[in-house]
Image (tube, grey):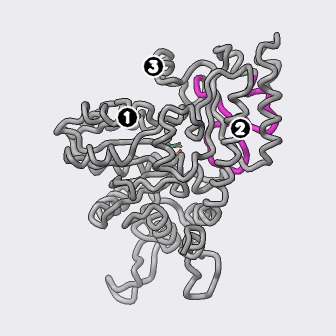
């Protein structure tokens, strides 16, 4: 069976009623026949039938042995870090999601878990930085917002040779484009808020493990810490996943066209998109992804906050908002929005220039999207304050 067919039919028909849509089991508890005698469900933090369907689907999509649904992407990341003990170290991609950085720095540091950040776009840097204390290697690929690509297969080998697990945050690619477990990763995490949900209408997180043993540990943490996904939000993610392949294919197609257009615009300096031949690790992306995703970032020749603000406040279709992966196109200015809390010097060193703009290319007709961003870019350099453009 091909992927889309397998995906759509991995969502079961309700055996009790024949309902083609997965029922939402909005319940806290389950009546038992005798003490300890039940139908596999005793309390809805531990297990919920709607959540269980989603957990099975994501395990299948990622080629893993166990899937676990959490209240947010950060709750999913938090559960993975709880596999570690005080004194253990994490080796993480330097261009890591800001929320993960905050969690590592302000929560886990005080419990004695240290994180070392390296540029993982060259696997040799991982080999150089890994130590016997490293128990977990943490990758994002592509990264946010500069779409850096790391070689999952090569880094999985390095992690395993040094007794560490590899976890990949697969939010940007989604399992429709990249399956890290099939490339050697032990754990995959998702912010299902993005492409898996796909409609900008929920917050959710997922963990997938490559073995049942590791899965049982995550399951224990999920129940013990309790940051589970609700039945209704589980249902929404299931509904999103039904069209994942279709959507992500179209997001990628649109994003490629927008990226190529941006390269030709005189106001644009750098364009970051793994689908461009000019991308630093385009060959690795081509090897491990079946498409390049819907996020494109770019900088302006006039590298100022002011010109970036002119652009992000001038589009009509691209709405100014954080987040990504939804049907509607969004854009944001990382320096003053998602990456505001990072000191300017550190931010710029990571490639997040003052004028960097991140696009989440949606599912509108791509001609309209190109017109929209083109018109906004034509305003760069025009004498006006950012405020005069802002709605
Ligand atoms: C959004 C995001 C997260 C955090 O997910 P939430 O659902 O917002 O908690 C983690 N990793 C990446 C790459 C993200 O884009």
> Which region shows up in magenta?
311-335
Which residue shows up at 29% across the image and 38% down it?
90
- Ranked by sequence position, the earlier of labels 2 and 3 is 2
Residue of label 1: 120
Q: Is residue 328 magenta?
A: yes
Residue behind label 1 places its C-beta within 8 angstroms of ligand 1:
no
Residue 306 lies in what quarter of the image?
Answer: top right
Give the residue furthest to the left. 132
- Give the mark toward the camera: 3 or 1: 1
Q: Is label 1 in contact with label 2 (beta carbons under 8 Å)?
A: no
Mark 3 surroundings within 10 Å by alpha-carbon count, few (fewer than 14), some (14 through 19), many (20 or more): few
Report the residue marked by disc 3. Answer: 346
Q: Give the crowd class for mark 1: few <14, some 14-19, many >=20 residues within 10 Å.
A: many
> Could you give the CA–CA distance between mark 2 and mark 3, rounded to whole angstroms?
29 Å
Quarter placement of the C terminus:
top right
Q: CA distance from mark 3 to mark 1?
A: 17 Å
Is residue 375 rendered to the left or right of residue 52?
A: right
**Spot occupied by residue 118 in the image (x, y as percentages of width and height):** 34, 30
The quarter of the picture where the N terminus appears is: bottom right
Question: Residue 89: x, y in percent?
Answer: 24, 38
Residue 356 visible in the picture: no
| In the image, residue 381 above or below residue 359 | above
**Residue ID for mark 2:** 258
Residue closest to the far top: 383
Q: Main secondary structure of the magenta part?
A: loop
């Amino acid at each position: 069976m091909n992927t889309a067919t397998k995906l759509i039919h991995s969502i079961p028909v309700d055996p009790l009623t024949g309902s083609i849509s997965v029922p939402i089991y909005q319940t806290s508890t389950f009546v038992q026949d005798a003490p300890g005698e039940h139908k596999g469900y005793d309390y809805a933090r531990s297990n919920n039938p709607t959540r269980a369907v989603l957990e099975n689907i994501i395990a299948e999509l990622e080629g893993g042995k166990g899937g676990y649904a959490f209240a947010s992407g950060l709750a999913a990341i938090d559960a993975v870090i709880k596999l570690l003990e005080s004194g253990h170290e994490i080796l993480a991609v330097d261009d890591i999601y800001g929320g993960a950085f905050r969690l590592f720095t302000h929560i886990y540091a005080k419990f004695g878990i240290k994180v070392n950040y390296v540029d993982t776009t060259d696997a040799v840097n991982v080999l150089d930085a890994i130590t016997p204390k490293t128990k977990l290697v943490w990758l994002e690929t592509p990264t946010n917002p500069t779409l850096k690509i790391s070689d999952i297969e090569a880094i999985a080998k390095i992690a395993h040779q040094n007794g560490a697990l590899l976890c990949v945050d697969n939010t940007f690619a989604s399992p429709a484009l990249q399956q890290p477990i099939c490339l050697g990763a032990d754990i995959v995490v998702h912010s299902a808020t993005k492409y898996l949900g796909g409609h900008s209408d929920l917050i959710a997180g997922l963990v997938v493990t490559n073995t049942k043993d590791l899965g049982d540990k995550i399951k224990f943490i999920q129940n013990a810490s309790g940051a589970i996904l609700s039945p209704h939000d589980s249902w929404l993610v299931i509904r999103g996943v039904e069209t994942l392949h279709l959507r992500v294919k179209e997001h990628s197609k649109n994003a490629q066209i927008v990226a190529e257009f941006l390269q030709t615009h005189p106001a644009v300096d750098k364009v970051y998109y793994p689908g461009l031949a000019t991308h630093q690790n385009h060959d690795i992306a081509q090897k491990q992804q079946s498409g390049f995703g819907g996020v494109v970032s770019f900088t302006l020749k006039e590298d100022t906050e002011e010109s970036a603000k002119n652009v992000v406040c001038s589009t009509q279709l691209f709405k100014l908002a954080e987040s990504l992966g939804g049907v509607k196109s969004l854009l944001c200015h990382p320096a003053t929005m998602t990456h505001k809390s990072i000191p300017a010097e550190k931010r710029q060193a990571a490639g997040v220039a003052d004028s960097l703009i991140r696009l989440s290319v949606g599912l509108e007709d791509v001609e309209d999207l190109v017109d929209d961003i083109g018109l906004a870019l034509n305003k760069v350099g025009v004498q006006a304050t950012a405020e005069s453009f802002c709605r």
